[in-house]
Amino acid sequence: MMDTPRPAPADFPKRDDRLTTILLVARLSTENWDDLCRIRNVSSGGMRLETRAALVTGERVGIDLKNGNAVAGVVVWTDRFEVGVQFDQPVDIVALLAPTAQSPRSLRLSARCPVVLRLDGHIVPGLLQNISQGGTRVVLATPARLNDGVVVVIPGLKSQRASVRWIAPGTVGLAFSETVAFADLSHWLAQQHRFSATSSAPLSPNRQSS
């Protein structure tokens, strides 16, 4: 007796004409978690996503795109590092994916991780508060100047050259010189390094791994 073939994830839902949008990066969020994802294809009724987030069927999710648009839905299937999401209501695909006149926004992911900055020849401890493929926000007690060049040492991720783009009391915004690869950042987000800080105070340099 022949087994009944399992429908391929890409066929869900079969009644929809699907627009393939390979390598479109977005932010995936649940009630207690956020993560980076890649939209593999999309229809008016749902999306097929690539993600390392541990999702289960029936879980509610939100998807934020770089153009500022967002959709919400429920997970209807999972298959290793891919999931299918059914939207709460049909969407206009063209409007959903339309480019914005402004620069695409940065998809920031939450984190709480001790880091080290190499700044003006000094080793400075800091606390990473969020991260994206293009930059990060760091709590920093040592004063910094706009456009200062730094090297950010993030446990579990390759050291990143960056520059200071904005300054607030006790906090700096850093722009990476090179975009962090999707695979590298999504893998890091799934590791314990992401929320390894146990207190509000940054670790001292001699306790920091490089």
Image (cartoon, grey):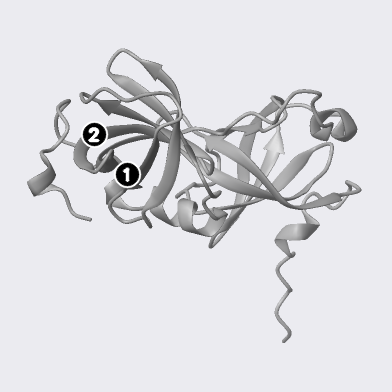
Residue type of the residue flagged with mark 1: Arg
Side of 90 relative to 173 (left or right):
right
The residue type indicated by label 2 comes to Gly
- Position of residue 119 measured from the top left corner of the image (x, y, whole percent): 29, 38
Q: Is residue 108 above or below residue 39?
A: above
- Mark 2, residues whose alpha carbon is within 10 Å: few (<14), some, or many (≥20)? many
The answer to whether 201 appears left or right of 10 in the picture is left
**Label 1 secondary element:** helix
Residue visible at 63% across and 46% down in the picture: 76
Q: Quadrant of residue 97?
A: top right
Which sits in the foreground, 69 or 6? 69
- The one nearer the camera, 123 or 54, is 123
Is 175 placed above or below 89 here?
A: below
- Of 86 and 19, nearer the camera is 19
Task: Report x, y in % for residue 25.
Answer: 65, 45
Are circles 1 and 2 on residues that touch, CB within 8 Å?
A: no
Q: Is residue 126 visible?
A: yes
Of tags 1 and 2, the one toward the viewer is 2
Most extreme residue toward the bottom, as rendered? 1
3D distance between C-alphas at marks 1 and 2: 14 Å
Dividing the image into 4 quarters, which one contains the C terminus? bottom left
Nearest to the observer: residue 77 or residue 67? 67
Disc marking residue 126? 2
Instruction: Rate crowding at label 1 as few (under 14), some (14 to 19) or many (20 or more) other CA atoms within 10 Å.
Output: many
Which of pointers 1 and 2 lies earlier in the amino acid sequence? Answer: 2
> Label for residue 194?
1
Asked if 8 appears above or below 195 in the picture, the reply is below
- Image coordinates of residue 13 in percent, x first then y, are 80, 49
Question: The N terminus lies in which quarter of the figure?
Answer: bottom right
Which residue is located at x 38 percent, y 57 percent? 158
Element at label 2: strand
Q: How many marks?
A: 2
